[in-house]
Image (cartoon, rainbow, N blue to C red):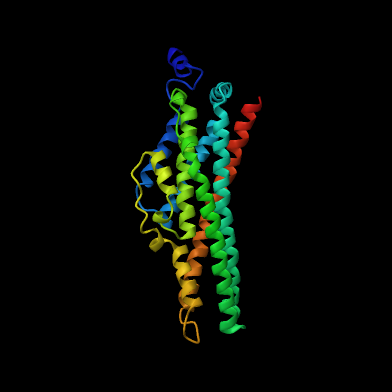
Amino acid sequence: MEASQSHFHVRSNSLPSRPHPLILQCNEHLDRLRSSNETSSSSSSLSHKLGGLQDLHECVEKLFHLSLSQEALHHECQENRVDELLNGSLRLLDVCTAAKDSLLHTKECMRELQSVMRRRKGGEVELKAEVKKFLISRKVVKKAISKALANLKGTRKNCNISSANKDNQLVSLLESVEVITLSTFQSLLQLISGTTQSKSNSWSLVSKLMQTKKVGCSQLADESEFAQLDEELQSCMFAQTSKFENTNNLQTQLEKVESLSQDLEEGLEFLFRRLIKTRVALLNILNH
């Protein structure tokens, strides 16, 4: 009985002094994701990270069902700390939506181009026109991604884990979840745009927040299927020959990007639903 009472003892109106198993499980997911951020940012690595994020946010969702968690957040409401968590949840939804929209826009253009390539009725003229349309679309996507990344520049102050919250295990955990999720989304946006780290300073922002080694992403453009697709589109657009000698290469790259996009889209949709649930849970706690 004494051990049980000790387990549920609440100190400073926070979670128990002995971490709940779900807290420990979430921290394990966080540690694995932090470790993966120090390695490659290739598409396969990012797909793996999205899977890790799914596990993390599924664990977080379970935390919100605990009465102890609700009590801890309710206490934080009185000190306006949940407001920042709400702002953070909105940031995550915005970035996730930007990634989803970028993938959807690219997939629609890919399907149109693949349809033209299958029909082959319009010959080189129609194909070239569709390739040009796709290149313009990619510029639109890259501009939107650039804007989304720029919007993250002001998150350093907001995402920085406050020392005032260190006595609250749940608040500190949720802040860490926001940081690692933003860093993964940011890396994913760069992958989709086909840019390198040197073209965006925003990655270094989240790296500092994570207090991890700066990820060397100089190989990102070489590894990104989206970057390789851009190169194939450019090659076909400006081909000097009467026929497209690189059509097969373009078709192969389109298939790779289509498969990758499907995997990423499924992972983002899962996370988007979990992020919505987290925000709703925070709003409910704030309003009661």
Q: In the rendered image of this protein, does residue 216 appear above or below residue 105? A: above
Front residue of this view, candidates 69 and 123: 123
- x 47%, y 14%: residue: 5
258 sits to left or right of 287: left
Q: Residue furthest right?
A: 287
Q: How many marks?
A: 0
Whether residue 65 is visible: no
- x 54%, y 52%: residue: 147
Quarter of the view holding residue 287 = top right
The C terminus: image quadrant: top right
Image x and y of residue 186, in percent: 47, 49
Image x and y of residue 146, in percent: 51, 54
Quarter of the view holding residue 134 = bottom right
Q: In the rendered image of this protein, does residue 17 appear above or below residue 112? A: above
Image x and y of residue 172, in percent: 46, 30
Image x and y of residue 3, in percent: 43, 15
Q: In the rendered image of this protein, does residue 79 appear above or below residue 247? A: above
252 sits to left or right of 75: left
Front residue of this view, candidates 69 and 20: 69
Whether residue 263 is visible: yes
Q: Residue furthest bottom?
A: 242
- x 39%, y 55%: residue: 198
